[in-house]
Amino acid sequence: MNIVILTGAGISAESGVPTFRASDGLWCGHRVEDVATPQGYAADPALVQDFYNQRRRQLAEVQPNAAHYALADLAARWEGNFMLVTQNVDDLHDRAHETSPPAPGFELIHMHGELLKARCSRSGLVSDWPGDMAADEPSLDHPHGRMRPHIVWFGEMPLHMDRIETALAACDLFVSIGTSGAVYPAAGFVQAARHAGARTVEINLEPTQGADLFDEGVYGPATETVPSFFN
Ligand code: BJW
């Protein structure tokens, strides 16, 4: 049996990482549009680099929670294919898997990029984040390139879409955890999974705007619902 699990900010919320669409519409004091678009970066690269540098520092203060560990445990014992697609740019899934090595059919995909990586704007080469980056720092691998955060901003193509679409077309179970379903193409994965004939489940604090698209809903904090669902 093949599983695809999509995670969003809600799975990291109880670790202390803020979600994006809280009631005040602000995200760490910023409008998402001011920092998470190529236009926002072009207008004020220093603000955007500083914003991501702050979030990288926050990562050092948070730990994976019971929901991340429950998925790592599933990845260690699942004998079929298991693709874990996260929209999160934190490294909490990665850290949870360090303690229990995943089975061979497992794959973790960061479709919106990773906070702890940087990318050359010219060559596309991805490298580890080198420490606090200044605005538009020159790239080491390309003479005319600049290092930018390895983050997928609005209007940019999410990463590894071909692999994700292939997995969705062959999945038997699709579970969406802690995501509002407000951002595409991730919000459309449930329809692709349904088309493949998969059982579809939403796990969230509360039903989302797309809850009717799922066969089942499981509601409550991820640190409780995720371990009990996959137990
Ligand atoms: C809990 C919980 C607990 C809380 N337990 N649950 C019009 C129509 C359709 C599409 C578009 C449109 N106009 C523009 C578009 C496209 C656009 C888009 O979708 N815009 C929408 C705003 C409409 N999308 C794009 O531009 C994407 N690219 C693209 O489409 O390329 C073209 C393409 C064509 C064909 C095929 C494929 C592609 C790129 C999107 C990039 C998103 N980037 C961001 C920021 C980067 C990361 C960063 O800086 O940190 O990614 S935006 C932000 O939203 C971030 C997130 O990954 C993403 C999703 O948010 P998420 O994770 O769902 O968080 P929240 O806060 O929304 O929800 C949290 C949930 O958790 C809530 O439901 C809570 O209830 C729950 N929760 N505590 C369980 N304890």
Image (cartoon, helix red, strand yellow):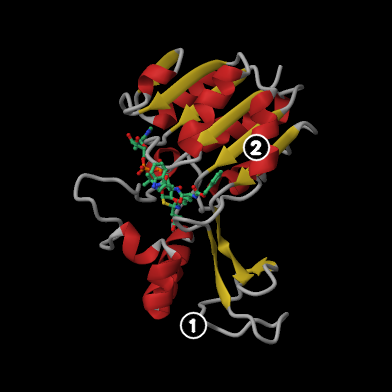
Query: Looking at the image, is mark 1 or mark 2 nearer the viewer?
Result: 2
Depth check, front residue: 65 or 185: 185
Q: Quadrant of the image for the N terminus?
A: top right
Residue at the image point whose x is 55% and y is 83% from the top:
137
Residue 208 x %, y %:
33, 28
Compared to residue 160, the image places residue 106 above or below, namely above
Q: Mark 2 is on which residue type?
A: Ile
Q: Quadrant of the image for the C terminus?
A: top right
Q: Secondary structure at mark 1?
A: loop
Report the number of discs.
2
- The answer to whether any part of residue 101 appears in the image is yes
* Residue 213, image quadrant: top left
Disc number for residue 134: 1
Depth check, front residue: 25 or 63: 25
Q: Secondary structure at mark 2?
A: helix
Depth check, front residue: 127 or 131: 127
Residue at the image point whose x is 63% and y is 81% from the top:
145
Dot 1 or dot 2, earlier in sequence = 1
Report whether the residue tagged 1 is closer than 8 Å to ligand 1.
no
Ligand 1 quadrant in view: top left
Q: Mark 1 is on which residue type?
A: Ala
Kindly identify which residue carries mark 2.
Answer: 164
Q: Do residues under tags 1 and 2 come within 8 Å of each other at their CB atoms?
A: no
